[in-house]
Image: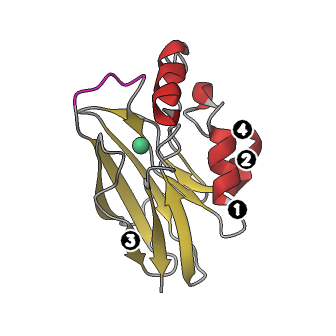
Amino acid sequence: MKLLSVCLLAAALPVGATVYAGQAAGAANGAKARTVELIGNEQMKFDKTEIAAKPGETLRIVLKAVGAMPKTIMAHNFVLLQPTADVAEFNKAAFNARETGFIPPDKKDDVIAATGLAGAGETVEVTFKAPAKAGSYNFLCSFPGHFAMGMRGKLIVK
Ligand SMILES: [Cu+2]
């Protein structure tokens, strides 16, 4: 029931007139990026929940959304968070941030890298440098309801 109301609410909101451009803090221009392909599906899951990276490695995350549902009620993004970020709080704030692609403007500092939203059949991507510090970094889809369904994972830097 909770999921249903999330979907209804999402459908009632205006279709995103503002396209959120993928952002990446400290993206390396010119550096050769390693591409990692991710798939997001209508079961609200990523096909990979762990991505390994070397410290400072340039990564290009390519996220493809598969399915047939309208983008207003089913879309995905990839949002990588700083280790200091509270992922649950970020996700909660994202709920009301449709105009900015579900990246809450007041929590932009929590974001290492983020794509725009991909609806069924669409692909979005972002290129960024993995953190220089070894560790485990949370990523999630911040479309309402998806984090709760398990649409999240870890970037493991080592
Ligand atoms: Cu999603």
Any part of residue 7 in sight: yes
User: Residue drawn at (64%, 31%), measured in percent from left and top?
Assistant: 97
Residue drawn at x 61%, y 40% is: 103
Marks 1 and 4, Cα distance to the nearest angstrom?
A: 14 Å
Q: Secondary structure at mark 4?
A: helix
> Is residue 33 placed above or below 98 in the rendered structure?
below
The residue segment tinted magenta is 68-72
User: Residue 62: image x %, image y %?
Assistant: 32, 51
Residue extending farthest to the front is 1
SS for callout 1: loop
Q: Which residue is mark 2?
A: 107
- If you read the primary sequence from the N terminus, does the residue marked by circle 2 or circle 3 appear first? 3
C-alpha separation, residue under disc 3 versus residue under disc 1: 18 Å
Q: Position of residue 40 (x, y in %)?
A: 31, 47
Circle 1 residues within 10 Å: few <14, some 14–19, many ≥20: some
Left or right of 134 on screen, residue 69: left
Most foreground residue, 46 or 114? 46
Ligand 1 is found in the corner quadrant, namely top left
Judging by the rendered image, the residue that carries numbered circle 3 is: 50
Q: Earlier in the sequence, mark 2 or mark 1?
A: 1
Report the amino acid beneath label 4: Pro
Image x and y of residue 19, in percent? 50, 25
**Label 4: which residue?**
105
> Which residue is rendered at x = 48% and y = 32% of the image?
1
Q: Which residue is mark 1?
A: 85
| Amino acid type for the residue under numbered disc 3 | Glu
Q: What residue type is disc 1 on?
A: Ala
Q: Is residue 13 magenta?
A: no
